Every structure is written in structure tokens, then in C-alpha cells.
Amino acid sequence: MTQHLAASLAETCPAWRRETAPIVERVAHTLSRHSPARLPHLTPLTGSNWKSAWDERNPHRTQRQPWTGGLALPNTCRDCGGELPTRRHRYCDGCRARRWSESAPRGRQNAQRVLAGLRADQRDPGRGGRAAELRGSKNAAHQRVVKAWTGEHTDPAQFADEILPGLQAASIAVIAKATGLSEHYCSLIRLGKRVPHPRHWGAFAAVTAPDHRIVTGRPAR
């Protein structure tokens, strides 16, 4: 039990007493009925005997309506106990980010295992059908952009010497977001197995800049 939850429970002790009092008395009365000794029918927690006596003495008296509201604890994070803005949330931003960082590698491993099984059964979802149409249209658009590009075609060794070393400290997700390329292709580039088209070199160089905005994935201006 977290410290925050323990403090919240302590603050709501009167409410818990009100909720559990009828149950405790009902259990005690049930046990007393099965006892060989004659035990008095007491209601020290709810005061039911006292209320009944007053009703018999003055049946026309104004009676207070019993409290019917539910007992609601504050909405807190299930991990750290911090307060949450709404009851739709289960974890705070920090705990949610930590859980995602811990579960994401396992999710990727499971996805890769399932994809490998599909490919082994010759049911690769990335081949044929709609996937092939999208891949073909994307490749055609890429070729059109390459033909229309009028920039300088520099030596690929320049990319390996000047830009590639700085990419080792950046995550694949950040590189992909900054360049607009797929994470798989960016992974191959960071490993040195591929050299991107020169039109992307500016975006890759911006990722390696010290003031690069890692949160947004946009190159510094």
C-alpha cells in the first residue's frame, strides 16, 4: 500500500465506519441468535434501537433521511498514488511513460515472432494485395521526387564521415520523425548499411545538432 493511499484511507475512516457498521451489527445479531445464552440485541454502531424508540414515542416527528451516497476515494495513480485529473486515467504521465518503455520491447519482440510465423506459413501481410499497391505507389512517388531533385549529388563517404557518427546517440523513432523515413530504413542508415538520398542529409544533420528538439522530432531552426 502506498503512503498516499494509506493517508486517503485514514482521512475517510468515518465514512468507512458508517458503511461497515450495519454489516458488523447484522453479523453480531446472527451469531447471538444461535448462542445458548440470552444476549441483548444491541445497536451501538448504528443506533437503530435508539431511533426505533424515538419513533414509537413520537411517530410524527421529523426524521432525517439516511445518507445514501456512495463512498468514493480520490482518483489516484495505481503505481505511485499521485492524483489524476479524471477517473478515466489509471496512471499518471510519468508512470505511463515508464510502463510503455518497459512493455514496448516485449511488444516488438512478440510482433516480430508473429510476423516470422506468418512469413513461414507464406502469409506475409506485407506482400501482395493492398500492401503491394501502397508500396508500389510510394516507390513511384519516391522515384518522381528523386528525378525532380536538382541539388548537388555529394559523395556518400561524406555522409559516413560527417553525419553518421552523430546519429548513434539518437533513437530510431526520433530520426524517423525528423526525416519522414520509415523506422526500418532509418535503422539501416544508423547501422551504416544504407546511405540516404542527399535531399535528406539536412534533416539527418539536424538530428545530430546539440539543440535538436528531441520531443517534437523537428530539426532545430
Image (cartoon, rainbow, N blue to C red):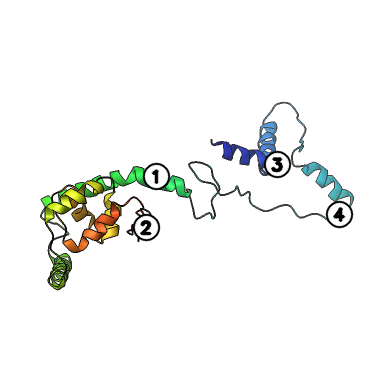
Which mark is in front, 2 or 1? 2
Q: Where is residue 24 in the image (x, y as percent from the top left)?
A: 67, 37
Spatial CA span between label 4 and label 3:
29 Å
Image-based side of 21 in relation to 174, left or right: right
- Between the residue at mark 2 and the residue at mark 1, the CA separation in whole angstroms equals 21 Å
Query: Could you tell me if the residues under marks 3 and 1 are in contact, i.e. CB atoms within 8 Å?
Result: no
- Residue 59 is labelled as 4
Alpha-carbon distance for marks 3 and 1? 35 Å
The residue that disc 1 covers is 99
Screen quadrant of the C terminus: bottom left
Q: Which residue is the extreme one toward the top? A: 37
Residue holding disc 2: 216
Query: Which kind of residue does numbered mark 2 sit on?
Result: Thr
Say whether residue 115 is visible.
Answer: no
Q: Earlier in the sequence, mark 2 or mark 1?
A: 1
Secondary structure, mark 1, is helix
Q: Badge 3 is on which residue? A: 14
Describe residue 214's horizontal placement relative to residue 168 as left or right.
right
- Amino acid, disc 4: Pro
Q: Which of 23 and 120 is in front in this view?
A: 120
Q: The residue under label 1 is which amino acid type?
A: Arg
| Amino acid type, mark 3 | Pro
Task: Answer few, some or many: residues within 10 Å of disc 3's Cα (few below 14, many 20 plus, some between 14 and 19).
Answer: few
Q: Quadrant of residue 105?
A: top left
Nearer the N terminus, badge 4 or badge 3?
Answer: 3
**Disc 3 secondary structure class:** helix
- State the residue at coordinates (65%, 36%): 27
